[in-house]
Amino acid sequence: MQTLFDIIYEDADLLVINKPAGLVCHPTKGDAWSSLISRVRLHLGPDARPHLINRLDRETSGLVLVAKSETAALELRRIWEGRQVQKEYWALVHGHVAAERGTIDAPLGRDGESKIAIKDRVCAEGAAARTDFAVERRFTRDAGNFTRLKVMPHTGRKHQIRIHLAHLGHPIVGDKLYGGDEDLYLALVEDRLTPEQRQRLILPHHALHARELKFLWRGHETVFRAEPEDWFLEFLA
């Protein structure tokens, strides 16, 4: 029997989920299984009013925090808006990143040259964005050289980690929008990815995983962690 999702933690106020890659957070025109929030409603029941505190891109896996009440949602949103939460992601990128660690401090805004409306880019007039990274492992496969990075965003701009790593010259493996050929993204949303395109992408989804959330919750330091999916770990093995 198919499960709704992988529950990391649950109590009267919080539901913490390890979202699989490929699942959108927001409702779509599909059935009740087609988005994370609709699955949450199935889990909590028809009278529930859940609130997504953080959101991940469709292809990004990892931790999503859900508040079960308006009160908990207000408290948690104050923490997020006050940037009082530490976030850690794992990313697999193309190439061997030379620096052991570093900071990408580059503003982000709309990519006016792209035919894809949601695509952003580094631009001087954009909103401030900062991402720290550290090399965890460099490795080689038949498809080339790769690096596993630990990534810590300090701002929460749309597609921030993906754009910053591509700007660094090391796009995320499997990224269809920022990997150099945005037609791959159009092929994904139009459900027309060919076997050749899938082979070029190497992995079934882009290799970005929201690994850890740490924040002070009602007087207690709280940490949630989630493991990546098998396809991510097998590429590392």
Image (cartoon, helix red, strand yellow):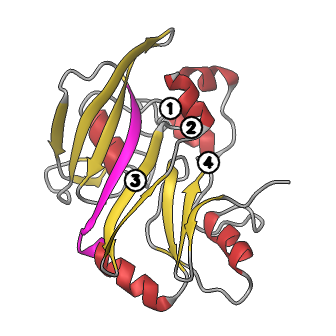
C-beta proximity under 8 Å, tags 1 and 2: yes
On the image, the x and y values in percent for residue 4 come to 72, 61
Q: Which one is closest to the eye, mark 3 or mark 1?
A: 3
Disc 1 packing (10 Å; few <14; some 14–19; many ≥20):
many
Q: Which residue is mark 4?
A: 22
Residue found at the far top of this picture: 142
C-beta proximity under 8 Å, tags 4 and 2: yes
Residue at left 69%, top 23%? 195
Q: Is residue 156 above or below residue 160?
A: below
Q: Secondary structure at mark 2?
A: loop
Q: Is residue 83 magenta?
A: yes
Q: Which residue is mark 2?
A: 205
At label 4, the amino acid type is: Gly
The residue closer to the viewer here, 116 or 231, is 231
Over which residues does the magenta segment extend? 80-93
C-beta proximity under 8 Å, tags 4 and 1: no
On the image, the x and y values in percent for residue 35 come to 65, 63
Q: Secondary structure at mark 3?
A: strand
